[in-house]
């Protein structure tokens, strides 16, 4: 694989970042994951808009402008002949010559930009046909989940807890209400109505979420943006999650309780189809 590091395209085995990089020592950085279908990026402008917001919130700056960023994405897709999959990009606050909690002067320490591709089938998905199982877990992440930081340890722990429990993913719960999935936005469907948490600092504003809600509204589907409890999720007719790497993914059980008939529900299946029709 050819990867990108600070201006250079290199074989992945030759790419180097300093041990003093603040991404490595402090999880001081932001990232984006954009999907690729048929060699084309999906919703790139949504991702760059969110990236710029994340950067601003952390007083970080991108070493390249958004046009250059798009050009690098395209170059990596071409170099690695990615037909379907993802492009991962992260910007960290660079590498001062030592460990220091304070931010370095950006004039002296440039940020580190790293990008790589992952080839993966995402449109044709066996998992989407069977649906996935989630468990609920306390949301113990920091309180600024609207910023897409590389601080993903708790999300990893949540996925490990799900695996241990024989499930596929975890939905996070705070004060009794579901915030979001470990790496996706969470939805339930009750009496035909799509219910998903309103945006705020508690969740990441998903790019796929924005697209799916827009398409659902255009298809005259009923939407309610509000927090829901785990109990409500267990009693829902169906559930699903959205993310750039899975699009619309049906959820068929919550904490071991089957939803509906235990198969992907009609609203989830329809939304996945609409998303694939409109976005891909
Ligand atoms: N995850 N919520 C969280 C906590 C996420 O990490 C993600 C994305 C989402 C969905 O956002 P989007 O629709 O823009 O992908 C929601 C990416 C895919 C990841 O970490 O791999």
Image (tube, rainbow, N blue to C red):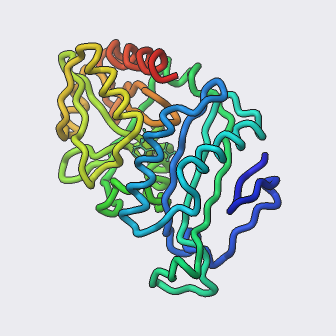
Q: Position of residue 104 (x, y in %)?
A: 51, 82
Q: Position of residue 2 (x, y in %)?
A: 78, 48
Could you tell whether 274 is left or right of 70 in the image? Answer: left
Residue 270, compared with residue 204, is above or below; it is above
Could you tell whether 52 is left or right of 37 in the image? Answer: left
Residue 31, compared with residue 257, is above or below; it is below
Residue at screen point 44% across, 36% down: 243
Q: Position of residue 32 (x, y in %)?
A: 51, 49
Total labels: the figure holds: 0
- Looking at the rendering, the quadrant in which ligand 1 lies is top left
Q: Position of residue 241 (x, y in %)?
A: 38, 32
Q: Nearer the viewer, residue 182 or 212?
A: 212
Residue at screen point 45% across, 18% down: 278
Could you tell whether 60 is left or right of 181 in the image? Answer: right
Q: Quadrant of residue 183?
A: top left
Q: Nearer the viewer, residue 197 or 29?
A: 29
Residue at screen point 31% across, 29% down: 257
Residue at screen point 49% across, 46% down: 164
Q: Nearer the viewer, residue 25 or 252?
A: 25
Residue 114, compared with residue 35, is above or below; it is below
Q: Quadrant of residue 235?
A: top left
């Amino acid at each position: 694989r050819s990867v990108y590091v600070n201006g250079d395209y290199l074989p992945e085995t030759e790419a180097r970042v300093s041990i003093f990089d603040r991404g490595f020592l402090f999880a001081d950085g932001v990232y984006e994951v954009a999907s690729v279908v048929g060699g084309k990026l999906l919703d790139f402008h949504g991702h760059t808009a969110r990236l710029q917001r994340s950067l601003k919130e952390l007083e970080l700056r991108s070493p390249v402008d958004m046009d250059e960023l798009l050009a690098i994405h395209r170059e990596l897709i071409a170099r690695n002949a990615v037909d379907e999959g993802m492009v991962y990009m992260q910007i960290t606050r660079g590498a001062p010559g030592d460990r220091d909690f304070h931010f370095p002067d950006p004039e002296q320490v440039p940020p580190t930009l790293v990008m790589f591709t992952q080839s993966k089938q995402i449109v044709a998905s066996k998992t989407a046909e069977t649906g996935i199982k989630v468990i609920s877990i306390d949301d113990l992440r920091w309180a600024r989940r609207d910023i897409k930081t590389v601080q993903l340890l708790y999300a990893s722990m949540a996925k490990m807890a799900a695996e241990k429990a024989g499930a596929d993913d975890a939905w996070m719960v705070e004060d009794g209400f579901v915030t979001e999935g470990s790496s996706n936005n969470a939805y339930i469907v009750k009496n035909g109505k799509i219910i998903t948490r309103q945006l705020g600092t508690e969740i990441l504003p998903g790019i796929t979420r924005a697209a799916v809600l827009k398409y659902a509204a255009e298809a005259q589907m009923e939407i309610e943006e509000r927090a829901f409890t785990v109990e409500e999720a267990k009693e829902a007719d169906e559930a699903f999650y959205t993310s750039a790497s899975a699009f619309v993914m049906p959820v068929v059980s919550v904490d071991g309780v089957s939803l509906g008939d235990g198969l992907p529900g009609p609203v989830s299946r329809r939304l996945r189809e609409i998303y694939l029709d409109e976005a891909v």
